[in-house]
Image: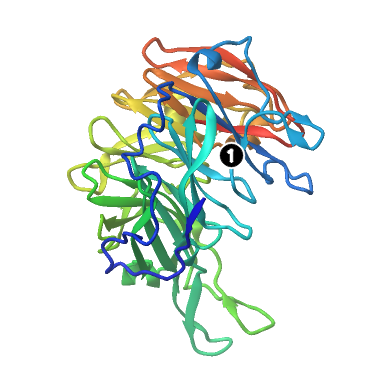
Amino acid sequence: MKKNLFRTVLFSTVTAITLGSCSNDDNDSGSNPGEDNTRWISLTGSFPDDTGTAGNGGTRALAITPENAANPSYEVDLFKMNGSEYVEGFALKSSRTARVQASEDGKFLYNIQYTGADGGVFNKYSVAGGKYTEVGYELNTASILGTAPRWVKAAEGIGVGVYSGTVTTVYEGTAPNFVYKSRDCEVKIAAIDLNNTAITNTAIFNFPWTDAERAAGYSVGRIDVPVLNADKTKLFIGCNVAKVDPTKTPTISTAGVPTWPSDAANINGTKTLVVDYPSLKNPKVITSTLTKTSNHGYRTMTQYVGTDGHLYQATATSGADIIRISKTTNDYDPTYHFNLNTALGITGASIRAWRYVKDGVAVVLYTTTTAAGGYVALVDLNAKTATKLATEIETNAGLSTTLGQYQNIGLIGDNVYLPLTPAGVDGNIYIVNVKNKTITKGAKLKTASGSFYLGAY
């Protein structure tokens, strides 16, 4: 395995990094490894760490055919062991649960290792003959993204990783007369060519709050799920927004450091960081006042470009809203608001993961505060309607937890693939046909203590 360790901090003035010092095994289009034309479905699952914490030990993958995925008599046992060895499947490189992405045709998986000695190292795997083979070279992104990066496939063939630094509170004066100034952090972005395994550009800047927002106590913690618009001219990055009240008296620690009280109730809306692409310049923040819930997700995608060219954004994983960013203005559309509670006629829903399919149709995985378990809905974003689709496992309370770790909903044509298992409880692949508006139970998924399935690709 060839390696290319990217350790030098690069700035946004760099427009392309060719990394030409290493030969590249995969600089074809990245779409046709070997002679295998089978459309494989990769299932990923997480296993516990040494302390037994569910889903915290790493990630395994197994490729099956769509025919096997649809067969309720077919059994997938990703976590079966013979002594200390796993019987089937493949271990993706990562000390903790990997954040796996895939090419649209399922022929490649991509991962940036999460924590550990190799945290920040990008790996690419071909899925040929149902087997996983590491291809190309490793790419170390840690100097930009750190060793626990947030990253996704922002468009086909393009990965983007993002990082937000520690929030630093700036103030003046002395106790007890401190004067609040701002709460700022540094943002870092890296664009990755997934076909040729190269970092093509990076950027570093302070989060671009306006002076008024800074003075009002706004800050951002986690940023995540960067997605390119249809024209690939703008990059939209979800934000976990916080706010303090600078007008209140701060609490002063024993070290003499002031902390102002939270003012989350007065956040004026969900916010998205926008930069130009591919330059990664001109950062700004756009705000939707239709919801206050953040849109940064956890390990799941929250944003998709629709068939109509607009970008649809969910307030996952704690909200029930899907809002829209206009393809014309690259700003929020104040006239569009989908609410899952309203569409289903329920209360307390939280979108845990979702997938835009086509023509305004989407599939949503959700939980509610009124009933334990995890649920499936077929959504029409144009009509703003939703239909609950029943599964045999939906009332299992363990799904409330594992859906919070969900990473990817598989899609082939009109079929959506949903592996659903609580930790340590067997489940199934459920297949939603969006054309027929049906859900069927497919292959059985065997688990083990502390293990569960994360997604399908």
Q: Is residue 189 left or right of residue 330?
A: right
Residue found farthest to the left = 328
* Residue 371 pos. (x, y %): 64, 27
Quickly name the residue at label 1: 404
Residue at figure coordinates x 29%, y 33% from the top left: 306
Image mark count: 1
Residue 205 can be seen, yes or no: yes
Q: Position of residue 35 (x, y in %)?
A: 40, 26
Would you identify the image quadrant in which residue 86 lies? Answer: top right
Amino acid type for the residue under numbered disc 1 = Gly
Q: Is residue 214 left or right of residue 418?
A: left
- Which residue corresponds to the image point at 21% horizontal and 42% vertical from the top-left? 327
Residue, far right? 83
Q: Nearer the viewer, residue 422 or 287?
A: 422
SS state under label 1: helix
Residue 294: in sight, yes or no? no
Q: Residue 52 versus residue 172: which sits nearer the camera?
A: 52
